[in-house]
Amino acid sequence: MPGAWIWVARSGNMGRVFCVGGNWKCNGTKASIAALCNDLQGDAVDAASCEVVCFPPFIYGTYARELLREDFQMGVQNCWIGKGGAFTGEISADMIVDVGFGWACLGHSERRHLPQIKESDETIATKTKYALDAGLKVMFCIGELLEEREAGLTNSVNERQLKALADIISDWSNVVIAYEPVWAIGTGKVATPDQAQETHAAIRDWLAKAVSTEVAESTRILYGGSVSASNCVELAKKPDIDGFLVGGASLKKDFLTIVDSYKQK
Ligand SMILES: O=C(CO)COP(=O)(O)O
C-alpha cells in the first residue's frame, strides 16, 4: 500500500536490522558466566528485527557458547592484525572463524587509549580489514574523549577514526559502527538521545560524502556508553540509532530489557 511505502522511505532506515552487542570486557568466572547465561534465557528474539552478539573474554568463549542461548551470536573483543604465525599470545581472525565465532569488536576506546595498549587508527583499520577478509563481521568502535568533545572536535575525531578504515576497505556490508563517546563509558554519564542522534547523523553524513550514500543508509550505527534498562528506549527511538554496544549492563539480566528496545523502532 502506497502509504506504508512512503513511511519506509521517509524513515530513512533502509531496513537496517537493530543490533545489540554485549561487551563483557575482562570480566567473568566460570561460575558468573554460567549464572549470566542462565539469567539471559528468554523468549527468542525476532531475527529479522534484531541481532544480538555477546563478546566474552577469549578464554571463556567456547564455554560461554555452550551455555548461552542459541539466538545470541558470539564474538571476540580483539584479534591479531594479520595471519597467524610466530606471534606469541595472539589469536588470529582465521582461528576465530575456525572455532565458529562470527564477530570481532575492534577499535574499542580501551584499546585505543589505555597506555598499556595504545592501538593506533591504522592498526585498528588494518586489523579490521584482515578480520573482514577472514570472514568476520566487525563492530568497529569510534568515539571522542571528553576534552575532544569540549574542544568541539567530536565529529573530526570520529571522521579521522573512520577515514583510516575507509582508506583501505570498500565493502562495508559486514561493518557495524559503534559510536562510544569515551566520557560516557562506564561513567553513568550517558549521552542524551539528542546528543547521540546528532553525532550519529553526522557519522552517516560523513559516510555519504566519503564512501557512498548506499553505505551511509545501510550501515548500522550503534550507540555505546552507560546504556541501561532505563535509558535504552528513548535512545532507541532516535532515527539514526540502530542499536547499542553495552558494557556493564550486559553482565546483568537488564541486558534483556536493552535487547527488547528493538520493539520501539
Ligand atoms: O564500553 C562500552 C561497551 O563497549 C560501554 O560500557 P558501559 O556500558 O559500561 O558504559
Image (spheres, helix red, strand yellow):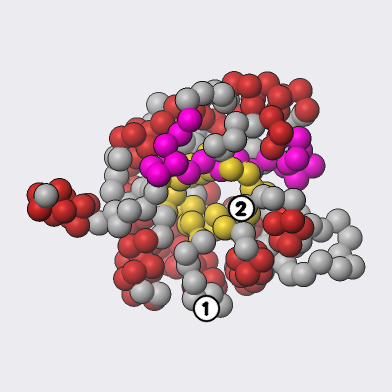
Question: Looking at the image, which residue is at 78% across and 28% down?
Answer: 30
Residue 124 visible in rendering: no
Q: Which residues are magenta?
A: 44-64
Mark 1, other Cα within 10 Å: few <14 / some 14–19 / many ≥20: few
Identify which amino acid the numbered label 1 is placed on: Asp
Given residues 225 and 87, the one toward you in this image is 87
Residue to which mark 2 is pinned: 103
Q: Is residue 54 visible?
A: yes
Looking at the image, residue 88 sits to the left or right of residue 74; the answer is right
Say which of 187 and 255 sits in front. 255
Task: Residue 54: give its label.
Answer: none
Residue 61: x and y in percent read: 73, 41
Note whether 240 is above or below 262 in the view shown.
Answer: below
Residue corresponding to mark 1: 167
Residue 68 percent location from the top left of the image: 64, 32
Q: Is residue 8 above or below residue 218?
A: above
Q: Residue at x 49, y 76 (%)?
A: 170
The kind of residue on which mark 2 rests is: Trp
For label 1, the SS is loop
SS under mark 2 = strand
Disc 2 under 8 Å from ligand 1? The reply is no
First in sequence, mark 1 or 2: give its number.
Answer: 2
